[in-house]
Amino acid sequence: MAPDPHPDPHPDGNRPSAPDPDPAPAPDPAAPTPPPATQEEAFVEPVVTDPVSAPGADGVPRRTTRRFPLFTRDTARPEGGGRAAPGDAPAPARQWPILAVLGLVALGLLITALDQFRIGIILIGVALLGGAVLRWLLPGVGMLAVRSRFTDIATYGVLGAVIVLLALMAQPKPLLQIPFLKDTLHFTVDS
């Protein structure tokens, strides 16, 4: 085979592109830029450098690491999670709803420990029902607000109602008898 009389200076096939015959002039940095015509043109999408960094108010990512921070500073407060009393009041007064619920629960546990289990457990259930009512009626309940208002009311209400109903149906001498539950229990034990 005869050598090629015109060897290819780029054997890998990557040829440089031809120079642009009419290059565009570079923009003058001192020249003022025209104002955007619409609001959509004025909005600049912030650049996020990795999947977990969130842009701050200035659009620059605040964290560029995948490790979570030691202290969380930007968690949203639940709806109604503000103070239950003015800010100049002492700390217990600002958190009176949760203290009232916890105080009733503690009293119910004490009564249960003193061998009056039905009264103590009913008091615990009533405390949770009272927490649901406080969460529903008051605009700010302090630390009694954990999730959204609806979720808190549903959680406190259902747990309180179940605890009260179970305390009323507890043996011996139940104060509340539901016939179909007795039949269901016999059906599961007999089969």
Image: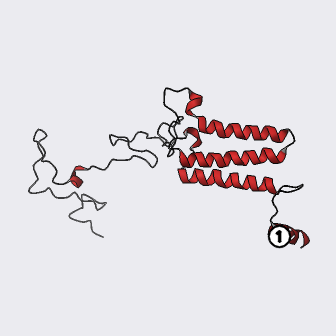
Classify residue 81 as left or right of residue 186: left
The residue shown at (55%, 32%) is 94
- Does 32 sit above or below residue 177? above
Decide which of 184, 122 is in the foreground and name it: 122
Decide which of 110, 71 is in the foreground and name it: 110
Colour scheme shown = secondary structure
Classify residue 31 as left or right of residue 12: left
Labels in figure, total: 1
The residue shown at (84%, 39%) is 113
Per the image, label 1 sits on a secondary structure element best described as helix
Residue 77, image x, y percentages: 50, 42
Q: Which residue is mark 1?
A: 184
Rendered image quadrant of residue 189? bottom right
Classify residue 159 as left or right of residue 153: right
Quadrant where the N terminus is found in the figure = bottom left
Decide which of 162, 76 is in the foreground and name it: 162
Residue at the extreme front: 175
Quadrant where the C terminus is found in the figure = bottom right
- The kind of residue on which mark 1 rests is Thr
- Does 83 sit above or below residue 132? above
Residue 78, image x, y percentages: 51, 45
**Label 1 Cα crowd, 10 Å radius (few <14 / some 14-19 / many 20+):** few
Residue 97, image x, y percentages: 60, 39
Rendered image quadrant of residue 144? top right
Classify residue 185 as left or right of residue 4: right
The residue shown at (43%, 44%) is 53
Residue 24, image x, y percentages: 11, 52
